[in-house]
Image (cartoon, helix red, strand yellow):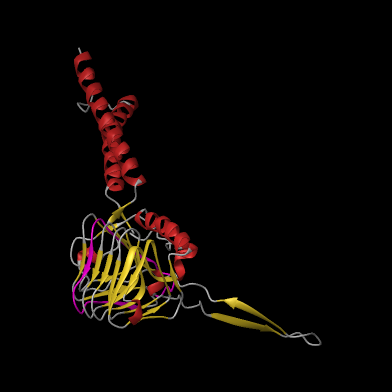
Amino acid sequence: MVSNRAITSPFGAAIRLRRMTARIAPLAVIAVGAALLFTPVRGDAAQVPVSLGTADGFAVLAGSGITNTGPTTINGDLGTYPTTTITGAGTLTVTGTNHGGDAVTQGSKTDLVTAYNNAAAEGPTSPIVADLGGQSLTPGVYNSASSIGLTGALTLNGGGDPNAVFVFQAGSTLTTASASQVNLINGAQSCNVFWQVGSSATLGTSSSFLGTILALTSITVTTGVTVDGRVLASNGAVTLDTDTITKPTCAATPTTTTTTTTPGATTTTTPRVAPTATSLPVVPASATPSALAFTGFNPRLPLIGGLMVALGVFLLGLSSVRRRRSRLDRP
């Protein structure tokens, strides 16, 4: 007696498995490609300090002159070129060297252009979508296609790394409100904070600012501002009014020593540099979404992901065509 059950051929099973694989594989390729396409990466993946070259020694550097009102203290060098006019120099206290428009200033202006371009090219970037006030940011490169504003307090969290770098890129202006401030925590240092400004910068009255400003045009430091950093204007003027500007200095990395004693031998002491902390940046729970350093995109991953999605769609279409042909070929 013959069973009514269909006899399963191993060849038929193999054909069905191949057809199933042909359907699933394109979908898998599309899924992986989509995941790569939208994979976020850390905004600080490629951050490096901005080298200032010979401009490093300047606290104030201008392109079209310096104007000062009231008693202003500059702890660092001072210079302006090609316009060499310094108005209100009688109430300036300069603890560094007033280079005016000498050869040192001219060389530093050339290096300033290079530093500005390097800061503008830093990346990958995290977008600045709101005023920086009230935010706590981890090391990285932060970019605004237009202006950057600061009202209130901005906190820069070094995450335990004294070499942590913060770069801010403004397509146009940088403006800070009166009494605004920039605070550093967990090892962050003002010598590693850079503000690349596409046009001009204005620091509000009685504000406290940290970092080096690299402005394409001019910089206005209003009344009673304290700057732990530099104000470097490439083409425009620098305007001061009863301010204190101090060129920042990075604290030396601490060192430890190991002592080796051998009986009958001379004792030797070998200095050893303490390792740099590598802990991941910590984003406080109160940080706003724009403060997170996970918003940039690796430029290679979207390309790979896009190619994989396109390949998956192609394979899916090819599989569909083959299935239709197979149905038409059946008797």
Residue 256's quadrant in the figure? bottom right
| Residue 84 in sight | yes
User: Residue 226, relative to residue 236: is it above or below?
Assistant: below
Whether 186 is among the magenta residues is no
- Residue extending farthest to the right is 264
Tell me what residue is drawn at x 20 percent, y 79 percent: 179
Question: Residue at 37% across / 57% down in the picture?
Answer: 116
Residue at x-position 40% and y-position 77%: 187
Q: In the rendered image of this protein, does residue 326 appear above or below residue 81?
A: above
Residue 302 position in % (x across, y down): 31, 44
Judge whether residue 1 can be spotted in this image.
no
Q: Is residue 183 magenta?
A: yes
- Is the N terminus in the top left, top right, bottom left or bottom right quadrant? top left
In-image side of 240 versus 55 (left or right): left
Rendering quarter of residue 329: top left
Front one among 306 and 207:
207
Instruction: State the image coordinates of residue 65 (x, y, percent, origin top left).
Output: 33, 65
Residue shown at 21% from the left, 78% from the top? 205
Q: Quadrant of the C terminus?
A: top left
Displayed quadrant of residue 26:
top left
Where is residue 189? Give x, y as percent: 39, 75
Image x and y of residue 298, in percent: 34, 50
In the visual, does 83 lie left or right of 288? right
Could you tell whether 276 is left or right of 92 in the image? right
Q: Which residues are magenta?
A: 160-185
